[in-house]
Image: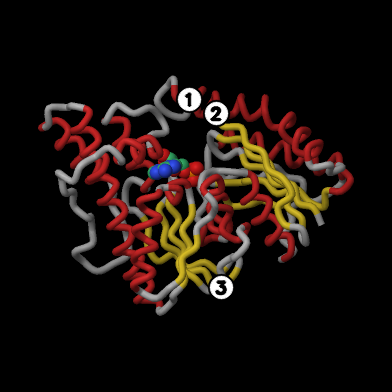
Amino acid sequence: MYILGIETSCDETGVAIYHSERGLIHHLLFSQIDMHSEYGGVVPELASRDHIRKLIPLIKQLLHESNTLQTDITAIAYTAGPGLMGALLVGAATAQSLAFAWQVPTIAVHHMEGHLLAPMLEDNPPKFPFVALLISGGHTLLVKVSSIGQYELLGESLDDAAGEAFDKTAKLLGLNYPGGAKLSELAKLGQLRFRFPRPMTDRPGLDFSFSGLKTFALTTFQKSEKTNQDKADIALAFQDAVADTLAIKCRRVLQQTGLTTLVVAGGVSANIKIRSTLTEMIEKENGAIYFPRPEFCTDNGAMIAYAGYQRFLLGQTQGLEIFAKPRWLMIDL
Ligand code: KG4
Ligand code: ZN
């Protein structure tokens, strides 16, 4: 069985083919980052138009390069939300049109479930039950995962998502959108000079708050001489604070749930410092940790094809209506 996956929720056009026995067959990604960086952030209308331009050619290329015929495709999975409405509609309308033409069902996939299941594409996938830390540009979630679709929200960010805090802090240090990965590069040149708070770790609970760190970075920057070294030192202090905060909350959630497996996914899980801090924590707790390969941390079609395959196995296909839900809670799945 071949599942075509389509991701268009934000600023990446991603497509992939997943096969029930052979696993991931092929995937392609077109990133719109160069286009949006001129404006310092994602421009939703430009994102939609670019998905329209790129999606069909990318699907054609995907089928061609993987020697897959359209008649081989069993079902089409697409990101139905959460995300930018216009961008989601491009993926949904394209998926439904192809499904109508090819006479196959569609599967509406939740973007964060895609991220959550991305580590399942690796050779040694995690086994249920586990705790998932999902850290992306729009979400920071701690979820207890008992099986596909059995998700219990244990903690979330009360303000900025982890990726959003990275991007905003990067911006104030003069780095271009999306600044997360660039901030992490800059932090490599940093020296341990500043110590930022570890927000909400001095009280019980599993929620996060990252917006104060961005403000802390801003005031530290304003008080500094604003040299390149100052910027690097602030980047390092900010990144260390996020990594430690995530590790403290993850240790807490494992102790509270009695679970020993942690899955970390979403764009920010590509961050090397966060990966190493969480790995050190898990080793001390005698647990196991799983990440997607770096290219599947950020948005991609492979995770949507895989999540779609799992939903297809549960019989969750959809009619021909165009379903797009910009706001969609994962616990409603
Ligand atoms: O999962 P994702 O691609 O999109 C959403 O679903 O939001 O996550 C994008 C976020 C951005 O905020 C980006 O700056 C951040 O992930 N990001 C990183 C790194 N790579 C991507 N943040 C910190 N360090 C990185 N290496
Ligand atoms: Zn994402």
Distance from the alpha carbon under mark 1 to that under mark 3? 38 Å
* Number of other residues with Cα within 10 Å of mark 1, as a class: few under 14, some 14 to 19, many 20 or more: some
Identify which residue, 220 or 152, lies in the foreground: 220
Specify the quadrant of the image occupied by residue 169: top left
Check disc 1 and report its element: helix, strand or loop.
helix
Residue 199 quadrant? bottom left
Q: Position of 100 compared to 163: left or right?
A: right
Q: Is residue 173 above or below residue 156?
A: above
Residue extending farthest to the bottom is: 258
Q: Residue type at mark 3?
A: Phe
Mark 2 surroundings: few (<14), some (14-19) or many (≥20) residues within 10 A: some
Residue occupied by mark 1: 36
Q: CA distance from mark 2 to mark 1?
A: 6 Å
Marker disc for residue 128: 3
Q: Secondary structure at mark 2?
A: loop
Q: Is residue 137 visible?
A: no
Give residue 46's position: percent from left, percent from top.
55, 24
The residue tagged 2 is 32
Question: Residue 68 at what x, y percent from top left?
Answer: 84, 44
Q: Residue at x 42, y 52 (%)?
A: 135
Marks 2 and 3, Cα distance to the nearest angstrom? 35 Å
Q: Quadrant of the C terminus?
A: bottom right
* Helix, strand or loop at mark 3: loop
> Badge 3: few (under 14), some or many (20 or more) residues near its Cα, within 10 Å?
few
Which tag, 1 or 3, sits closer to the chain's start?
Answer: 1
Examine the image and state in which quarter residue 11 appears.
Answer: top right
Is residue 186 found left or right of 79 in the rendered image?
A: left
Left or right: 94, with 227 as reference point: right
Position in image of residue 213 (x %, y %) = 23, 45
The x, y position of residue 168, in whole percent, is 32, 36
Query: The disc labelled 1 sits on which kind of residue?
Result: His
Q: How is the image coloured?
A: secondary structure
